[in-house]
Amino acid sequence: MDGSGNSLLAGPESHKKRVAYFYDSEVGNFYYGQGHPMKPHRIRMTHSLLVHYGVHQKMEMLKPIPARDKDLCRFHADDYVAFLKAVTPETQHEQLRALKRFNVGEDCPVFDGLYSFCQTYAGGSVGGAVKLNHGHSDIAINWSGGLHHAKKCEASGFCYVNDIVLAILELLKYHARVLYIDIDIHHGDGVEEAFYTTDRVMTVSFHKFGDYFPGTGDLRDVGHSEGKYYSLNVPLKDGIDDESYQSLFKPIITKVMEVFQPGAVVLQCGADSLSGDRLGCFNLSVKGHAECVRFMRSFNVPLLLLGGGGYTIRNVARCWCYETGIAVGVELDDKLPYNDYYGYFGPDYTLHVAPSNMENRNTKSDLEFTRKYLVENLSRLQHAPSVPFQERPPDTEIPEEEELDMEARGDRYHKWNGNMSDWDAEDDTICHSQEANANDVNFPRWSSLSRA
């Protein structure tokens, strides 16, 4: 039992892990605008749930240090970062050419505190990578991160800064190989693009493919040059359920871990792949989604867990709270504890939500073909690439992290004053830009590889 009398049950993999959890109470105050499906408020809801379950007592609680301009420019173009820093809702009408150039204004609106928001969520992901690099944590969590669509010179799909690429670049300072896995319903295009020509980062994306944003991620897209066969795409159809999903996830990832042997893993846990998501069309339960986290935890490799999509926010909070429990090795009781947003979770007030009866359009033959194709491609990689370790880039300078004072939280959860119906409206539709551009990454200087 935790201090509030709620059940924290030991899970089947409850052996202890040192977990660092990054959270800034201000992140829930950022607001994309009326009717926009992306709601940072879901991060605060997640945090409230896990605190009332008592999960926070089992983690190191850290407030992210905001990423600086030069940190963001390790991947993003200087002029793009300068634009994000300067633009405001009041001045955006004077910068129409720049808005168009950087794809800001529609899916990716200008809102109050935009640059501060980017600094915060990127700072959490880079901070998590630093924790893992220094061996201070086995797992690092930043649910405000995982914004996988952002490109070097433009925003895309509600994402402005690609915190995932920045975190992977940080991990590459200490690890010869980094594995990126994406279980968001949308293709992880920004991360794949960034690392498409290197064999130091393998990207694996499980996503809806077809007439669906961002329109990339074909099974045949496998990487280029030194990166050939180091990009894996798992295209899926509507209605995939837990059993079908795991019939691909576990054998493919098992083979990836065997062949690639990463020194660290980044798992983007976009919750829009859950059943009933406002913008999604999959049929995963919270437990089915979280099974990916449980499986990756079992490999005992440094693991960075990040957020991503997720637009039915009560279910996002349920999912990421449950997955935080898995990270620390506890199984949370299905009955929700009373929390700051208890009204969102009615009428059942449970942690788990049953999947729907929607049709699973992924046939057994489709799944078997995809599995065989990807495992065959992985078999072309005889063994993990080796890296000639030369001069390592300097560590990112991060001041000593400020521990969250849970006793001093006061009423900071309640700063948002909007009404619930706007935060979880179900009737808005968003059109997505399908435009993409190739990006080059400033890799660490010892990134040239030779095959062993």
Image (cartoon, rainbow, N blue to C red):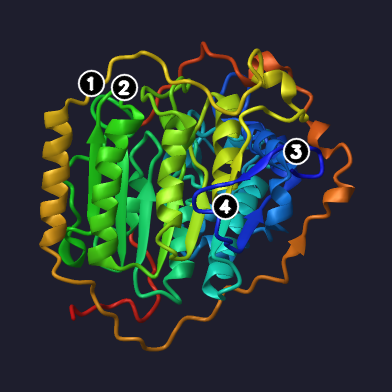
Mark 2 is surrounded, within 10 Å at the Cα level, by few (under 14), some (14 to 19) or many (20 or more) other residues, namely: many
Sequence order check: which comes first, mark 1 or mark 4? 4
Measured as percent of width and height from the top left, residue 191 is found at: 37, 52
Dot 2 corresponds to which residue?
Answer: 239
Residue at (31% x, 39% y) in the render: 246
Q: Is residue 417 above or below residue 85?
A: above
Q: Return the residue found at the far bottom.
A: 390
Callout 4 crowding tier (Cα within 10 Å): few <14, some 14–19, many ≥20:
many
Labelled pair 1, 2 in contact (Cβ < 8 Å): yes
Query: Do we see residue 434 in this rendering?
Result: no
> Which amino acid, mark 3?
His
Cα–Cα span, label 3 and label 2: 33 Å
SS at circle 4: loop
* First reached walking from the N terminus: tag 1 or tag 2: 2
Please tell me the numbered disc located at residue 52: 3
Residue behind mark 4: 329
Q: To which residue does mark 1 refer?
A: 361
The residue sitting at 54% across, 23% down in the picture is 312
